[in-house]
Image (cartoon, rainbow, N blue to C red):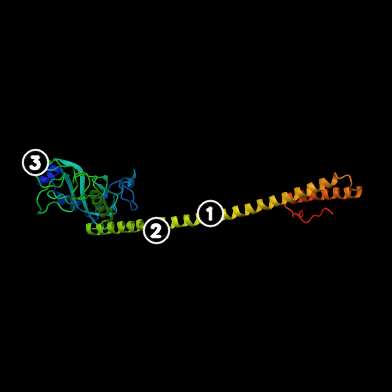
Amino acid sequence: MADKSNSAYMRCEKSVNELVMRLGNLQYEEINIIISNAGPIHGGSSVESGFEPGTLRPQSRDLTTRPPRPCLVVELRRFVKLNSYKAISPFLITILGTTVPETIKLWFIRQRIQPFVDRPRQCNKCFVYGTRTCDKNNICFCCGGDHIGPCQQPAKCVNCSGSHNAKSRSCPIYIQEQKILELKSHNHITIGEARRVFQQKNAKYAESVKTLPAVSNIEESLNAKFENVLKTINDKFERQMQLFVDMLQKSMNCILQKFFKIFERSVDPSLSRARKKKLLSKFNQITSTLSTWDAGGPSEVEQMSLY
Protein backbone atom coordinates (compact mmCIF):
# COMPACT_ATOMS: atom_id res chain seq x y z
CA MET A 1 0.00 0.00 0.00
CA ALA A 2 1.12 3.54 -0.67
CA ASP A 3 1.79 5.84 2.24
CA LYS A 4 -0.01 9.12 2.81
CA SER A 5 2.65 11.40 1.32
CA ASN A 6 3.05 9.19 -1.73
CA SER A 7 -0.67 9.07 -2.41
CA ALA A 8 -0.79 12.86 -2.18
CA TYR A 9 2.12 13.51 -4.56
CA MET A 10 2.88 10.48 -6.76
CA ARG A 11 -0.48 8.66 -6.93
CA CYS A 12 0.99 5.21 -7.44
CA GLU A 13 1.06 2.00 -5.44
CA LYS A 14 4.78 2.21 -4.56
CA SER A 15 6.30 4.27 -1.79
CA VAL A 16 8.72 7.14 -2.34
CA ASN A 17 11.67 5.08 -1.12
CA GLU A 18 10.90 2.30 -3.58
CA LEU A 19 10.65 4.80 -6.44
CA VAL A 20 13.94 6.44 -5.45
CA MET A 21 15.73 3.10 -5.21
CA ARG A 22 14.28 2.15 -8.56
CA LEU A 23 15.58 5.38 -10.13
CA GLY A 24 19.01 5.00 -8.55
CA ASN A 25 19.49 1.35 -9.42
CA LEU A 26 22.62 0.99 -11.53
CA GLN A 27 22.71 -2.80 -11.87
CA TYR A 28 20.78 -4.59 -14.60
CA GLU A 29 20.48 -8.30 -15.31
CA GLU A 30 20.92 -9.66 -18.80
CA ILE A 31 17.75 -11.26 -20.21
CA ASN A 32 17.64 -13.73 -23.07
CA ILE A 33 14.57 -13.31 -25.25
CA ILE A 34 13.53 -15.64 -28.08
CA ILE A 35 12.40 -13.50 -31.00
CA SER A 36 10.72 -15.14 -33.96
CA ASN A 37 11.32 -13.88 -37.50
CA ALA A 38 14.29 -11.70 -36.46
CA GLY A 39 17.73 -11.24 -37.93
CA PRO A 40 20.99 -10.71 -36.05
CA ILE A 41 21.25 -7.62 -33.80
CA HIS A 42 24.73 -6.12 -33.63
CA GLY A 43 25.15 -4.65 -30.14
CA GLY A 44 22.24 -2.22 -30.14
CA SER A 45 19.67 -1.36 -27.54
CA SER A 46 16.90 -1.00 -30.14
CA VAL A 47 14.94 -4.17 -30.78
CA GLU A 48 13.00 -2.84 -33.77
CA SER A 49 16.13 -2.45 -35.90
CA GLY A 50 16.75 -6.20 -35.81
CA PHE A 51 13.55 -7.41 -37.45
CA GLU A 52 13.80 -8.74 -41.00
CA PRO A 53 10.80 -9.99 -42.98
CA GLY A 54 10.98 -13.50 -44.45
CA THR A 55 13.24 -15.02 -41.78
CA LEU A 56 11.63 -18.17 -40.33
CA ARG A 57 14.37 -19.55 -38.06
CA PRO A 58 14.19 -18.64 -34.38
CA GLN A 59 17.20 -16.82 -32.94
CA SER A 60 18.34 -16.22 -29.35
CA ARG A 61 19.66 -12.68 -28.78
CA ASP A 62 21.03 -10.81 -25.77
CA LEU A 63 19.46 -7.36 -25.44
CA THR A 64 22.01 -4.88 -24.09
CA THR A 65 20.90 -2.11 -21.78
CA ARG A 66 21.64 1.58 -21.97
CA PRO A 67 24.57 2.97 -19.94
CA PRO A 68 23.69 3.97 -16.36
CA ARG A 69 22.98 7.52 -15.31
CA PRO A 70 25.97 9.75 -14.52
CA CYS A 71 24.45 10.73 -11.14
CA LEU A 72 22.80 8.66 -8.45
CA VAL A 73 19.57 10.05 -6.98
CA VAL A 74 19.23 9.04 -3.35
CA GLU A 75 16.26 11.21 -2.35
CA LEU A 76 13.46 13.02 -4.13
CA ARG A 77 11.08 15.31 -2.25
CA ARG A 78 8.43 17.69 -3.52
CA PHE A 79 7.68 20.92 -1.70
CA VAL A 80 4.22 21.73 -0.36
CA LYS A 81 2.68 24.98 0.77
CA LEU A 82 2.95 25.94 4.42
CA ASN A 83 0.20 24.49 6.65
CA SER A 84 -1.34 22.59 3.74
CA TYR A 85 -0.79 19.52 1.56
CA LYS A 86 -1.03 21.39 -1.75
CA ALA A 87 1.98 20.51 -3.87
CA ILE A 88 4.01 23.13 -5.71
CA SER A 89 6.34 22.79 -8.67
CA PRO A 90 9.86 22.77 -7.08
CA PHE A 91 11.51 19.46 -6.15
CA LEU A 92 14.37 18.85 -3.75
CA ILE A 93 16.73 16.23 -5.22
CA THR A 94 19.63 14.71 -3.31
CA ILE A 95 22.33 13.09 -5.44
CA LEU A 96 25.68 11.49 -4.72
CA GLY A 97 28.83 13.22 -5.92
CA THR A 98 30.66 16.54 -5.77
CA THR A 99 29.31 18.15 -8.96
CA VAL A 100 25.75 19.15 -9.79
CA PRO A 101 24.54 18.45 -13.35
CA GLU A 102 22.62 21.10 -15.26
CA THR A 103 19.71 18.75 -16.04
CA ILE A 104 18.41 15.39 -14.86
CA LYS A 105 15.96 13.03 -16.55
CA LEU A 106 13.04 11.90 -14.38
CA TRP A 107 10.19 9.78 -15.75
CA PHE A 108 11.26 10.40 -19.37
CA ILE A 109 11.30 14.19 -18.84
CA ARG A 110 14.50 16.23 -18.65
CA GLN A 111 14.32 18.65 -15.74
CA ARG A 112 16.55 21.69 -15.26
CA ILE A 113 18.40 21.89 -11.94
CA GLN A 114 18.83 25.20 -10.14
CA PRO A 115 20.96 25.74 -7.03
CA PHE A 116 18.91 26.47 -3.93
CA VAL A 117 19.75 29.85 -2.37
CA ASP A 118 18.19 30.32 1.05
CA ARG A 119 17.01 33.66 2.36
CA PRO A 120 18.95 35.32 5.19
CA ARG A 121 17.79 34.12 8.58
CA GLN A 122 16.56 36.86 10.91
CA CYS A 123 15.56 36.62 14.55
CA ASN A 124 11.90 37.28 15.27
CA LYS A 125 12.72 39.01 18.58
CA CYS A 126 15.82 41.16 18.15
CA PHE A 127 15.76 41.16 14.29
CA VAL A 128 19.48 40.40 14.02
CA TYR A 129 20.58 38.26 11.07
CA GLY A 130 22.10 34.83 11.52
CA THR A 131 19.48 33.05 13.64
CA ARG A 132 15.74 32.44 13.81
CA THR A 133 15.23 33.08 17.51
CA CYS A 134 17.14 34.11 20.61
CA ASP A 135 16.67 34.70 24.35
CA LYS A 136 16.52 38.50 24.15
CA ASN A 137 13.43 40.62 24.75
CA ASN A 138 11.11 41.54 21.91
CA ILE A 139 11.77 44.89 20.28
CA CYS A 140 10.01 46.95 17.63
CA PHE A 141 11.22 46.11 14.12
CA CYS A 142 10.46 49.66 12.96
CA CYS A 143 12.36 51.82 15.46
CA GLY A 144 14.26 49.21 17.48
CA GLY A 145 12.73 50.36 20.76
CA ASP A 146 11.00 48.37 23.50
CA HIS A 147 7.39 49.55 23.59
CA ILE A 148 3.85 48.21 23.28
CA GLY A 149 1.34 49.22 20.64
CA PRO A 150 1.75 50.91 17.27
CA CYS A 151 5.11 52.55 16.68
CA GLN A 152 5.10 56.34 16.51
CA GLN A 153 8.85 56.79 16.17
CA PRO A 154 10.76 57.32 12.90
CA ALA A 155 12.10 54.20 11.24
CA LYS A 156 15.58 53.10 12.31
CA CYS A 157 17.29 49.81 11.50
CA VAL A 158 18.83 47.93 14.43
CA ASN A 159 21.45 46.38 12.13
CA CYS A 160 22.85 49.33 10.14
CA SER A 161 21.16 52.32 11.91
CA GLY A 162 19.67 53.38 8.57
CA SER A 163 16.39 55.20 8.02
CA HIS A 164 14.38 52.02 7.35
CA ASN A 165 12.89 49.21 9.40
CA ALA A 166 14.79 46.06 10.31
CA LYS A 167 12.89 43.92 7.77
CA SER A 168 13.70 46.09 4.76
CA ARG A 169 15.42 44.27 1.90
CA SER A 170 17.29 47.42 0.96
CA CYS A 171 19.30 47.15 4.17
CA PRO A 172 23.06 46.79 3.48
CA ILE A 173 23.30 43.99 6.07
CA TYR A 174 20.51 42.05 4.33
CA ILE A 175 22.23 42.46 0.95
CA GLN A 176 25.52 41.30 2.48
CA GLU A 177 23.92 38.19 4.01
CA GLN A 178 22.21 37.41 0.69
CA LYS A 179 25.55 37.60 -1.15
CA ILE A 180 27.13 35.28 1.42
CA LEU A 181 24.35 32.72 0.92
CA GLU A 182 24.73 32.95 -2.87
CA LEU A 183 28.47 32.38 -2.49
CA LYS A 184 27.77 29.36 -0.29
CA SER A 185 25.28 27.86 -2.76
CA HIS A 186 27.26 28.38 -5.97
CA ASN A 187 30.59 27.19 -4.54
CA HIS A 188 29.19 24.33 -2.38
CA ILE A 189 30.88 25.45 0.82
CA THR A 190 29.72 25.98 4.38
CA ILE A 191 28.28 29.24 5.63
CA GLY A 192 31.40 29.87 7.72
CA GLU A 193 33.71 29.42 4.72
CA ALA A 194 31.48 31.64 2.57
CA ARG A 195 31.51 34.36 5.23
CA ARG A 196 35.31 34.17 5.51
CA VAL A 197 35.76 34.40 1.71
CA PHE A 198 33.37 37.36 1.54
CA GLN A 199 35.25 39.19 4.31
CA GLN A 200 38.58 38.57 2.55
CA LYS A 201 37.20 40.07 -0.67
CA ASN A 202 35.93 43.12 1.21
CA ALA A 203 39.31 43.50 2.95
CA LYS A 204 41.13 43.50 -0.40
CA TYR A 205 38.68 46.09 -1.74
CA ALA A 206 39.20 48.25 1.36
CA GLU A 207 42.99 48.09 0.91
CA SER A 208 42.65 49.15 -2.72
CA VAL A 209 40.41 52.05 -1.67
CA LYS A 210 42.99 53.16 0.92
CA THR A 211 45.64 53.45 -1.79
CA LEU A 212 43.49 55.93 -3.74
CA PRO A 213 44.35 58.95 -1.51
CA ALA A 214 48.06 58.22 -1.99
CA VAL A 215 47.57 58.17 -5.76
CA SER A 216 45.67 61.46 -5.62
CA ASN A 217 48.46 63.02 -3.53
CA ILE A 218 51.04 61.93 -6.11
CA GLU A 219 48.92 63.44 -8.86
CA GLU A 220 48.65 66.75 -7.00
CA SER A 221 52.42 66.80 -6.44
CA LEU A 222 53.09 66.16 -10.13
CA ASN A 223 50.68 68.93 -11.13
CA ALA A 224 52.40 71.38 -8.78
CA LYS A 225 55.84 70.50 -10.16
CA PHE A 226 54.59 70.82 -13.72
CA GLU A 227 53.15 74.26 -12.97
CA ASN A 228 56.47 75.36 -11.46
CA VAL A 229 58.35 74.18 -14.56
CA LEU A 230 55.94 76.03 -16.84
CA LYS A 231 56.29 79.18 -14.76
CA THR A 232 60.09 79.00 -14.93
CA ILE A 233 60.03 78.52 -18.70
CA ASN A 234 57.62 81.43 -19.11
CA ASP A 235 59.84 83.73 -17.03
CA LYS A 236 62.91 82.82 -19.08
CA PHE A 237 61.01 83.40 -22.31
CA GLU A 238 59.84 86.81 -21.15
CA ARG A 239 63.41 87.81 -20.21
CA GLN A 240 64.72 86.70 -23.59
CA MET A 241 61.97 88.63 -25.35
CA GLN A 242 62.82 91.76 -23.35
CA LEU A 243 66.50 91.44 -24.26
CA PHE A 244 65.55 91.03 -27.90
CA VAL A 245 63.32 94.11 -27.82
CA ASP A 246 66.07 96.18 -26.19
CA MET A 247 68.60 95.04 -28.78
CA LEU A 248 66.17 95.81 -31.59
CA GLN A 249 65.46 99.26 -30.22
CA LYS A 250 69.17 99.99 -29.86
CA SER A 251 69.87 98.83 -33.40
CA MET A 252 67.03 100.92 -34.83
CA ASN A 253 68.25 104.03 -33.01
CA CYS A 254 71.76 103.50 -34.34
CA ILE A 255 70.46 103.01 -37.89
CA LEU A 256 68.36 106.16 -37.73
CA GLN A 257 71.28 108.20 -36.47
CA LYS A 258 73.50 106.93 -39.29
CA PHE A 259 70.78 107.66 -41.81
CA PHE A 260 70.26 111.23 -40.64
CA LYS A 261 73.99 111.91 -40.74
CA ILE A 262 74.21 110.62 -44.30
CA PHE A 263 71.20 112.70 -45.30
CA GLU A 264 72.67 115.88 -43.79
CA ARG A 265 75.99 115.43 -45.55
CA SER A 266 74.35 114.61 -48.87
CA VAL A 267 72.46 117.93 -48.93
CA ASP A 268 75.53 119.97 -47.94
CA PRO A 269 76.43 122.20 -51.01
CA SER A 270 80.05 122.49 -50.01
CA LEU A 271 80.54 118.73 -50.22
CA SER A 272 82.48 117.50 -53.23
CA ARG A 273 81.10 115.11 -55.81
CA ALA A 274 83.44 112.30 -54.75
CA ARG A 275 82.32 112.66 -51.13
CA LYS A 276 78.65 112.50 -52.18
CA LYS A 277 79.37 109.35 -54.17
CA LYS A 278 81.02 107.81 -51.11
CA LEU A 279 78.01 108.72 -48.93
CA LEU A 280 75.69 107.09 -51.47
CA SER A 281 77.72 103.90 -51.33
CA LYS A 282 77.51 104.00 -47.51
CA PHE A 283 73.74 104.40 -47.77
CA ASN A 284 73.51 101.35 -50.03
CA GLN A 285 75.69 99.42 -47.60
CA ILE A 286 73.35 100.31 -44.70
CA THR A 287 70.33 99.18 -46.76
CA SER A 288 71.96 95.83 -47.56
CA THR A 289 72.92 95.43 -43.90
CA LEU A 290 69.31 95.99 -42.85
CA SER A 291 68.16 93.32 -45.31
CA THR A 292 70.74 90.86 -43.97
CA TRP A 293 69.79 91.63 -40.37
CA ASP A 294 66.08 91.15 -41.16
CA ALA A 295 66.91 87.72 -42.61
CA GLY A 296 68.60 86.69 -39.36
CA GLY A 297 72.19 87.46 -40.21
CA PRO A 298 74.70 89.45 -38.10
CA SER A 299 74.31 93.20 -37.78
CA GLU A 300 77.29 95.48 -38.38
CA VAL A 301 75.55 98.85 -38.23
CA GLU A 302 77.40 100.03 -35.16
CA GLN A 303 80.78 99.22 -36.75
CA MET A 304 80.04 101.29 -39.84
CA SER A 305 81.85 104.58 -40.39
CA LEU A 306 80.69 107.46 -42.47
CA TYR A 307 84.23 108.17 -43.67
Mark 3 and 2 residues: CB-CB less than 8 Å, in contact?
A: no
Element class at badge 2: helix
Q: Which residue is painted at 57% across and 54% down in the image?
A: 235
Is residue 218 or residue 8 the one in the foreground?
Answer: 218
Q: Which circle, 1 or 3, is nearer the viewer?
A: 1
Q: Amino acid at mark 1?
A: Lys
Location of residue 223 in the rendering, given as x and y in whole percent from the top left corner:
47, 54
Q: Nearer the viewer, mark 3 or mark 2?
A: 2
For label 1, the SS is helix
Whole-Å distance between the Cαs marked 1 and 3? Answer: 72 Å
Mark 3 or mark 2: whose residue is earlier in sequence? 3
Q: Is residue 255 visible?
A: yes
Circle 2: is it few (<14), some (14-19), or many (20+) Cα within 10 Å? few
**Rounded to the nearest whole Å, what is the CA distance between mark 2 and mark 1?**
26 Å
Residues packed near mark 1 inside 10 Å, few (<14), some (14 to 19) or many (20 plus):
few
Which of the two discs, 1 and 3, labels the residue nearer the N terminus?
3
Task: Measure how far apart labels 3 and 2 are at the Cα level.
Answer: 53 Å
**Residue 56 x, y percent position in the rendering:** 31, 46
Q: Which residue is mark 2?
A: 214
- Mark 2 or 1: the one toward you: 1
Read off the residue under disc 3.
Answer: 149
CB contact under 8 Å: marks 1 and 3: no
Direction left: furthest residue: 148
| Residue holding disc 1 | 231
